[in-house]
Image (cartoon, grey):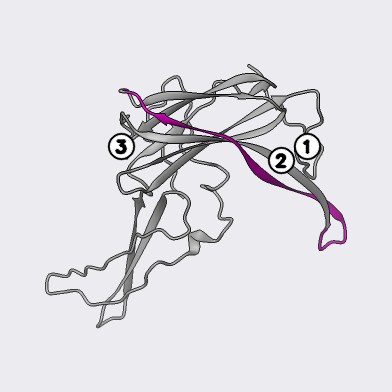
């Protein structure tokens, strides 16, 4: 997956991806080994060979980094040399970034989320319409028996849509949306935009809401406690 980082953040820390669907330093789904095309051919009289790499997305949820590896064999000596290159295939001509002014609020308080829309170079683009969805994340934890015979906690989550609002970025490519959240829990906030070809880009932020009621936060197989500062 490609990590978009061309926008100058300044004093606001925007996220330009949804970390639930992107993985920049790992390969959960084996996508890094996915071969899109393999081809062979002969160079022309000028020593050139042109081939086409298909860039149509299928199940990819984020922009992608393509790696091209080329092997060239000398017909007389059978000696081989190789080279490689990378290029980015953007899923959309427009990117959206979302930030959170707070990470922890009490129930019935309001949380605002700044929004920025940019082009591929990271320059703000005005008058881009999109929407932001607020999801309540509910965790379910069970114990599963591992191959070693011991039982381990296994947590999964389900996102329930609470509210969806539309936005249009201003003349500086910026705007913000706000949600008043009535119940405690963990919330996932997803911003989406589409370019002129209806290609979607999205980004997400998270916020925690405290309350008097019991809330399941999921459980891991360690005794660590994650501290979420309110300032």
Q: What residue is pinned by disc 2?
A: 138
User: Which tag, 1 or 3, sits closer to the chain's start?
Assistant: 3
Give residue 203's position: percent from left, percent from top. Answer: 48, 38
Point out the stretch of residues depicted in magenta. Answer: 145-170
Q: CA distance from mark 1 to mark 3?
A: 41 Å
**Label 3: element kind:** loop
Distance from label 2 to label 3 (Cα)?
A: 37 Å
Q: Residue furthest top?
A: 231
- Residue name at image x 82 percent, y 59 percent: 146
Residue indicated by mark 1: 216
Numbered disc 2: secondary structure: strand
Magenta stretch: dominant SS?
strand
Q: Is residue 104 above or below residue 220?
A: above
Mark 1 is surrounded, within 10 Å at the Cα level, by few (under 14), some (14 to 19) or many (20 or more) other residues, namely some
SS type, badge 1: loop
Q: Circle 3 is placed at which residue position?
A: 121
The reply to whether the magenta stretch includes residue 167 is yes
């Amino acid at each position: 997956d490609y990590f978009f980082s061309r926008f100058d953040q300044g004093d606001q820390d925007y996220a330009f991806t949804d970390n639930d669907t992107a993985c920049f330093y790992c390969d959960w789904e084996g996508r890094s080994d996915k071969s899109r095309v393999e081809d062979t051919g002969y160079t022309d009289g000028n020593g050139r060979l042109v081939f086409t790499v298909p860039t149509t997305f299928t199940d990819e949820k984020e922009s992608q980094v393509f790696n091209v590896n080329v092997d060239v064999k000398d017909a007389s000596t059978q000696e081989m040399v190789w080279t490689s290159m990378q290029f980015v295939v953007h899923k959309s001509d427009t990117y959206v970034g979302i930030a959170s002014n707070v990470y922890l609020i009490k129930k019935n308080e309001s949380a605002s989320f700044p929004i920025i829309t940019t082009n591929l170079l990271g320059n703000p683009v005005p008058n881009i319409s999109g929407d932001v969805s607020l999801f309540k994340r509910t965790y379910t934890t069970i114990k599963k028996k591992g191959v070693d015979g011991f039982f381990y906690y296994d947590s999964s989550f389900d996102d329930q849509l609470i509210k969806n609002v539309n936005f249009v970025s201003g003349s500086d490519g910026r705007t913000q949306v706000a949600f008043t959240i009535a119940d405690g829990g963990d919330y996932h906030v997803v911003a989406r935009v589409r370019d002129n070809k209806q290609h979607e880009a999205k980004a997400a932020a998270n916020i925690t809401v405290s309350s008097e009621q019991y809330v399941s936060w999921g459980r891991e197989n360690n005794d660590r406690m994650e501290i979420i500062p309110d300032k």
